[in-house]
Amino acid sequence: MANAEHSGRTAEPFVPAAGRADPAGRVDLAATADPADPAGARLRAARLGLWLVAALLAVRQVVVVLGTPRGERLTDLETWVGPDGVLHVNGSLYDSTRFTGTPFGGLVLKPLTRAAEQALGWGWTSGTLLLVAALGVIAARNLPRPPGRRTALLAAPVATSLLMLSLPVRNAFWLGQTSIIPVLLVVVGCFVARDWRATGALIGLAAALQPAVLLFAVLLWFTGRRRAAAASGAAFAGVTLLTWAAMPRDSYIYWVHHLAGTGLGGDADALANQSLHGALLRLGLSGPLEIGLFLSLGAAVASLGVRRAVRYARDGQLLLAVAVTGCAAIAVSPTTWQHQLLWVLPAVVGRVGRRASDRCLWPVAVIMVMTLPGDMLLPHTAALDPLRDNAVLLAAVAAATLVPFLPRTSPYYRKPIPAEHAPPVPARFRRVPLLPFLKRVLTRPNLLLELLLIRVTYAAYQQVRLAATGGTNSGGRARAETHGQQILDSERLLHIDVERAVNHWVAGAGWLRDFFDFYYTSFHFAVPLTVLAVLYVRRPADYRWARASLGFATLLALVGFWLYPLAPPRLMPGLGVIDTVHGVQDFSKPDYGTLTALTNQYAAMPSLHFGWSLWCGLVIAIVARRQWVKALGLLHPFLTASSIVATGNHWVLDAAGGAAVVLAGFGLSYLLLGPRAQTAAGVTAATTAGPAASGSTADDPAPPLTPTPTRARTSAPRKDPAPR
């Protein structure tokens, strides 16, 4: 059916006609690249580097698993190990609810003996790595046709690396689960098998291991492959009945007593169960109401998911059709543990959005959801608990029912509306910018993507702060206090050791103490977020420039936290500094202070309290039009510097370090990306409107981002330097 127009005959929907006529046609661009082509040579070098990254990720997985003590690694697989050191031969699979597989899975593994026990480490882990690599290669070879040259060369190592990083694969490695096998069986059946019997047998076997996969038989039926659909149903029924005959007690426990595995492996309302059933239980629903709602929602998701998958299969987006069906299967299964959630990741191939600036929102969101824990995606607030606890499920349901993936017939599928770029701005140095392909964009980026990136960046910032002392504050206390003494000695040498004097003077003035305490605790996040929000709405081009500078500065600060943990004045024993914000410290305890359980109190050098405030002040001074606004912006870093010293939270040299990383951030932004695009926008506006109409020049400190409407146009033709 799909791609039948290219072959003149009916084609199987999961095996493109071009692929059958020439099996190598899927990577012709990679195979026929001219060795003398410099661009091709760079792409091949990039491909080799990406495969090296995938190999390093694979080695890391093996090291992590095999480096974990026995009893803590491969815990699900080792439920098979009996008291005599061999795998279970007698007794029920479900004597312990730790085993969550189907009876057929147990029937396959049950004959294994001591050799299997020895293979639980190297054998199982290495075999899983090979399965992941095979899955990545098959997925990359079945992207929508025809792929671009870059895609054909780089898709396989990128897909394999993403699989290695994904939470389901990492969880499967850690637990020793078989959840990758059903996914690979379905993918091989859909894209590799050339015969309807083989396709049906493979999908039937996959359903025998993971029953929700039987939804793919429905997809086969409605895409015209009815013999393959019937064969998959027959294979599933035959294998299940054979297992029932061989293991009647276990089959009854799994299919009847536990209702297709519900309740095995943990409580159904556990966070690890990312299905609609588990989500409804976590929301407090139970009994007939919850069951009825689950069945209704499951039927709706399955119906919409299969309907959309059929449409994408007929459109030629075969991998997306498989991913959408798998996402629907995740939702409708009574229990879907974390290691069974791999179906969401292939949905990254779907294209969403007509604008180029929106095109990366969906793939970035999917990759983040599939590679990062929910705590990093959303903050810990009660209102966001349902979203954070069900992030993967929501992504699966969205992919199956809501996300408007573009059809290949859409004019925006291959050519989205391009972003508006500023023309190049001459730099002071000949080789600036070092990354000329990152053009200055005048339009604002996607808001949801920006919020997600800000949240993930801040979560990583918190993790690095805490990890800088080995994960505990007490672990780095001695080193941090030694560094604190070094800073104090340096300040005494420079005659700027004013922290104790200023702190005691402010602590003695009640109104001043309250003011600095409030300023320290309230404006650290509020002002930078406000500046970013105003720039996003009013000055999109300046938003990108300022955001990049802030990101570089924060990254450099994280390096400082890691390399030089430093005790602030309030945590230096014997110095006598009063902690006006957090209260009296008990230095006799290893972990003292009210915040030591939340964050690293020794991440003082450089001071991002001052650094972020200086960034705000400089951005406001550069962008603002009115002088009083510029002065108000520069007042913020002055008050912040006073507050961090007065409250005993930072040394004076910490503020100097914060200033250094912020200036370096601006410098890196200029060096890598070139001058800010705001000046170029002024040139564009002046060119469009004319000098008399625009009333601005390239040196205007705050020129408009959009061309000023002209009252009278000249007859001379003009080439627009910023394509739209």
Image (cartoon, rainbow, N blue to C red):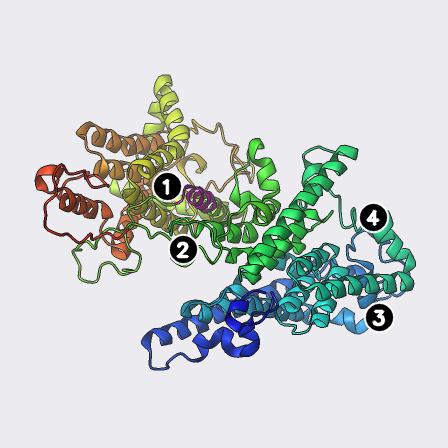
Where disc 4 sits, the SS reads loop
- Separation of marks 1 and 4 at Cα, in angstroms: 54 Å
Q: Which residues are magenta?
A: 446-457
Extreme-left residue of the structure:
692
Identify which amino acid the numbered label 2 is placed on.
Pro
- Of callouts 3 and 1, the N-terminal one: 3
Check if residue 451 falls in the magenta segment: yes
Identify which amino acid the numbered label 4 is placed on.
His
Q: Is residue 605 above or below residue 629?
A: below
Q: Is residue 62 above or below residue 254?
A: below
- Of callouts 2 and 4, the N-terminal one: 4
Image position, residue 383 (x, y; %): 56, 31
Where disc 1 sits, the SS reads helix
- Tell me whether the residue at label 3 lies in contact with that at label 4, contact meaning CB atoms closer than 8 angstroms: no
Image position, residue 125 (x, y; %): 66, 67
Name the residue beneath numbered marker 2. Answer: 411
Where disc 3 sits, the SS reads loop
- Tell me whether the residue at label 3 lies in contact with that at label 1, contact meaning CB atoms closer than 8 angstroms: no
Image position, residue 672 (x, y; %): 28, 57
Q: Residues within 10 Å of mark 4 (few under 14, many from 20)?
A: few
Depth-wise, is mark 1 or mark 4 nearer the camera?
4
* Left or right side of 456 for 672: left
Identify which amino acid the numbered label 3 is placed on.
Pro
Extreme-front residue of the structure:
8
Depth-wise, is mark 1 or mark 2 nearer the camera?
2
- Separation of marks 2 and 4 at Cα, in angstroms: 50 Å
Res 608 label = 1
- Of callouts 1 and 2, the N-terminal one: 2
Image position, residue 524 (x, y; %): 38, 34
- Separation of marks 3 and 4 at Cα, in angstroms: 24 Å
Name the residue beneath numbered marker 4. Answer: 258
Name the residue beneath numbered marker 3. Answer: 111
